[in-house]
Image (cartoon, helix red, strand yellow):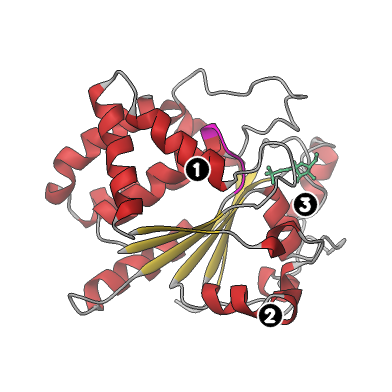
Amino acid sequence: MALCIHLRELMQIIEHLDENQLKDEFFKLLQISLWGNKCDLSLSGGESSSQKTNVIHSLEDLKPFILVNDMEHLWSLLSNRKKTREKASIVRVDIVLDNSGFELVTDLILVDFLLSSNLATEIHFYGKMIPWFVSDTTIHDFNWLIEQVKYSDHKWVSECGANWENYVKTGRWVYHDHIFWTLPHEFCAMSQVAPDLYAELQKAHLILFKGDLNYRKLTGDRKWEFTVPFHQALNGFHPAPLCSIRTLKAEIQVGLQPGQGEQLTASEPNWLTAGKYGVFQFDGPL
Ligand SMILES: O=P(O)(O)OC[C@@]1(O)O[C@H](CO)[C@@H](O)[C@@H]1O
């Protein structure tokens, strides 16, 4: 609820924000979406992991836990495109969703902001046809959430839901299903196994991959050295510029500075799996 209210407050002033203020807000909403990925039933042992404190107030404290931070690349890509594009041209951001519930709210708020700030003109979502893990987003969860938000008793929250419904109706938000997301393939096999999906992703100007499972599939779930470049670990999967937004819950991480992984292992043996650390890891030309 607090996030929807934050978004509505932002909408009131968005036209008056200068470049730096807009960038600050973008970075805030990116981080909220990152930490939204902490809310995962696999970490809470099935207990509800809804957000009880307002995450907006914790962002500064959480910054040291971002191990790779390519948020600047995302800003450069989208803000340059906004400056140079023709008026009627499309800027498409695709988002490969992860958990439903709180994480999905943070994702919808982020992409609503992208449209409202004209950093993007169209958002394409990818959910799962069947959940891989219990909390994975399906079309049912996506529609249900929009409906719940729309019928909130709080006027501003319900306005958010009404806007989201309208985005879907007018085609500014497009939801895609594809069986590939619940097949056992790593993403570098997509162009062979699901060329239609790969071609769809190629239409994006930026693809956001949410969560740990998507990171594992992006990097082929291999035991890479921590310093291997992200680009290399993607193993030829480059449909469009992309960014993983992920808290670490599995024993895999690439693109770190020399010694960074070893230092963390020495001080916090479970740093790879506890969901305490996060990354914004970008690959692509700017
Ligand atoms: O993709 P998510 O939701 O961020 O994480 C799901 C996940 O934590 O569950 C598994 C363990 O049960 C992990 O390997 C896996 O990555």
Residue at x 56%, y 79% (from the top left corner) = 199
Vertically, is 131 above or below 233? Answer: above
Query: Where does residue 19 sit, x and y in percent of width and height?
Result: 22, 57
In the rendered image, which residue does mark 1 sit on? 142
Which of pointers 2 and 1 indicates the residue nearer the eye?
A: 1
Task: Please report contact status of discs 3 and 1: CB closer than 8 Å, yes or no.
Answer: no
Is residue 258 among what the camera can see? no
Is residue 82 among what the camera can see? yes
Vertically, is 79 above or below 284? Answer: above
In the rendered image, which residue does mark 2 sit on? 191
Query: Where does residue 50 sit, x and y in percent of width and height?
Result: 56, 23
The magenta segment: 98-102
Q: CA distance from mark 3 to mark 1?
A: 36 Å
Q: Which quarter of the image is occupied by the C terminus? A: bottom left
Type of amino acid at the residue the image marks with label 1: Phe
Which of pointers 3 and 1 indicates the residue nearer the eye?
A: 1
Vertically, is 140 above or below 196? Answer: above
In the image, which disc is placed on residue 261? 3
Magenta highlight on residue 199:
no
Instruction: Please tell me which of labels 3 and 1 falls first in the chain.
Output: 1
Cβ of disc 1 within 8 Å of ligand 1?
no
Q: Main secondary structure of the magenta part?
A: loop
In what element is the residue under mark 1?
helix
Asked which quadrant contains residue 37, the reply is top right
Instruction: Please tell me which of labels 2 and 1 falls first in the chain.
Output: 1
Locate ligand 1 by image quadrant.
Answer: top right
Which of pointers 2 and 3 indicates the residue nearer the eye?
A: 2
Query: Where does residue 61 sit, x and y in percent of width and height?
Result: 51, 31
Residue at x 25%, y 55% (from the top left corner) = 117
Instruction: Please tell me which of labels 2 and 3 falls first in the chain.
Output: 2
Type of amino acid at the residue the image marks with label 2: Ser
Query: For this view, does 18 lie left or right of residue 275?
Result: left
